[in-house]
Image (spheres, rainbow, N blue to C red):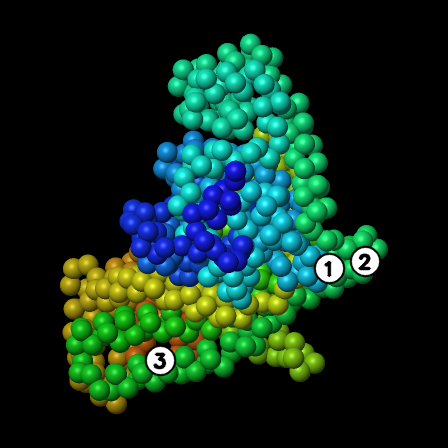
Amino acid sequence: MNCKSTVESLFSSQSRNLFLFSAPTFVALAAAKFHIALVGNPNSGKTSLFNALTGLNQKVGNFPGVTVDKKVGFFSVEENNDTELIDLPGTYSLYPRKADEWVAYKVLMGADADVQPDMVLLVADASNLKRNLLFCSQIIDLKLPVLLALTMNDLAAKKGIKIDIEGLEAALGIPVVAVNPRKNKGLAELKKAIAALSLTSREICSKVADFIDVAALAPKAIEEVQLVFPELSKYSALHHLINFEELASKNDHDQIPEIVQKNNFNPTKSQAEEIMQRYTHIRQIMQKNVVEPGPLEKKLFSDKLDNLLLHRIWGNIVLLAVLFLLFQSVFLLAKFPMDGIEWCFTNASSWLSAKLPNGWWSDLFINGIVAGLGGIMVFIPQIMILFGIITMLEDSGYMARIGFLSDRLMRKVGLNGKSVMPMISSFACAVPAILSARNIENKKERLLTILVTPLMSCSARLPVYTILISLVIDDHYYFGFLSLQGLVMMGLYFLGTFMALLMSFIFKWFITIKEKSFFILELPIYRAPRWKNVGITMIEKARIFVTDAGKVIMMISLALWFLSSYGPGNEIKQIETQYAAKIAATPTLQDSLHRSMLAEKLNHSYAGKLGKIMEPAIAPLGYDWKIGIALITSFAAREVFVGTMATLYSVEEDDDQSLRQKMQSATHPDGTKIYTLPAALSLMVFYVLAMQCMSTLAAVKRETRSWKWPLFQLAYMTLLAYGMSFLVYQLFS
């Protein structure tokens, strides 16, 4: 008997693929929330299936006690709208090595009290079925209700692979459904199979024949474990013998270590024999149910493309070209929408100034709220373009090739190819990039990656680079299309990358963690980007920037308006009285006197006094006190720099100029320009290298479980930023 035949006996079906069911019966059984664990090999299409089933009805957290992402989604099966799908980390087998693989392992072994699935939905790549069936066969032997979803069927067809799904179902003893989550094909059939299998109890599945003769691997030891824990299948008992320390929640009486010692159980030998037996059986199943092309078949297009893109010389040239186009596009494509947004806010401020009566509330609205909004909205085009291009690179499969190309270089500085993914992801945001470093098995390489990843220029730095480059770098084009501003932008990104590699090379000599390093990376096939996914990502990232970063920018803008509009004692009032008298005496100079009054009020405000205190420390870098205020506020979020400048200059100036024009004309007390080429370059370098992000420090503390490393990171990055900025200012002055 098997789970598949049991399902068929419960429901009359005219198709072996479609498991029909009684909806009222299913609803009654599914009144309580039904939990499904989604598992599969990496790059098997598991994430695509999760997104296709759950859509936007998802939430992300952490598995209890570990810093591993826990993705949970909800979808409907007939009348039941509360089916929970738990996306477990990808793994190749039930022999885990990494932290995320241990999470999936413990859930499947029933050792995670917080995640107890009622069913396992296993995703397998039809174009690489032999390897995927190893994991499938192990789950079958756990005696869990399991459903196999075959993905990549279109790729399998291109390779000349033909699968007899009915024969595969019969051989495995479980339901098998072909799906294409990228095109939403097969999802209805999959849901019907889920509903049918939900009526199959674990007791019935426990009677399914073993995929291999598990008991023969360690007969006496397995039998004794089952006497202690009768609820365990033979294969579960074998794993409790191998991993009794990690599965301690099941071993309350410490009896399994005694069984291991008594029977001289050898876990390595048992594991090797098990894998050999499984592959022997898998080969038999493949011979009967899968038609594969011969070894001399023509290579697929993706294989031919890899000959170029993974070439030691041409591959790196293509990579540089891709990055070059990325940074050129950020400037070229975003130029006109950014100019349009800036024009709208400048004219809106002028119109409001003319229409609203003078008063503190109108000043707050125009110079606090509107100026702050302008500082947020103007950079949305660049944020969207950057994330859109990165999403296309990931979706196409090229991002993984970058890791493969970079492995040799990474190893020289103490990292490996898997470090490239978090570092490139950091171009978007350092926080999720640091979290993604969990995929690096080696502890030393993972720590080094976490320590240097924030040196990569995240999207929060983009507004700072943009406005400073526009102030001191000519809008010049070489050969009619190469933007000088884009080249400078690319240089800043390369500076951050170079310093990250350099610091990793230095740190590797001082971090003494000893652990063997290896680099195993499966390259996904090349696919055309899903333009809907690209569009959704661009809109979502813009929304996050406006809502999350925007809230911080607005709060700081309003706080800065207050700090720059008011001061201690009666100083502000006295200045207003003095200038009122001067304006009354010389009304022809009203405009210039009014601007002078605003500047003097700002100097005597709370913000001005705070800035003057720190000005001596930053003067050697070419900065004035206003930039000093921006450096402080940037610790909340780097992009707050622009909002800070917008508020400070709006409070000081009372005209129709844009923020860029105000900063362009800003001067020191001696009349010299503030934003000269040396000062702007120094400030850009400071923002490339400084740790100005509280969220990143919190993420590092969370991942390393200590304040030691985030504090070290804050110290070394601040000193590095100050020293390099000082050097740049002196060299260009």
> Percent from the top left, x then y, of residue 386?
53, 67
From the image, tell me which residue sits under label 3. Answer: 345
**Structural distance between the alpha carbons of marks 1 and 2:** 9 Å
Tag 1, which secondary structure? loop
> Percent from the top left, x then y, of residue 283?
71, 41
- Which residue shows up at 52% across the image and 38% down it? 1
- Which residue shows up at 59% across the image and 27% down it? 214
- Which residue is more in the foreground, 365 or 187? 187
Q: What residue type is labelled 3?
A: Phe
- Which residue is more in the foreground, 37 or 565? 37
Q: Are marks 1 and 2 in contact (CB under 8 Å)?
A: yes
* N-term mark: 1 or 2: 1
From the image, tell me which residue sits under label 1. Answer: 160
Pointer 3: residues within 10 angstroms few (<14), some, or many (20+)? some
Mark carried by residue 297: 2
Q: Which amino acid does label 2 sit on?
A: Glu
* N-term mark: 3 or 1: 1
**Structural distance between the alpha carbons of marks 3 and 2:** 61 Å
Tag 2, which secondary structure? loop
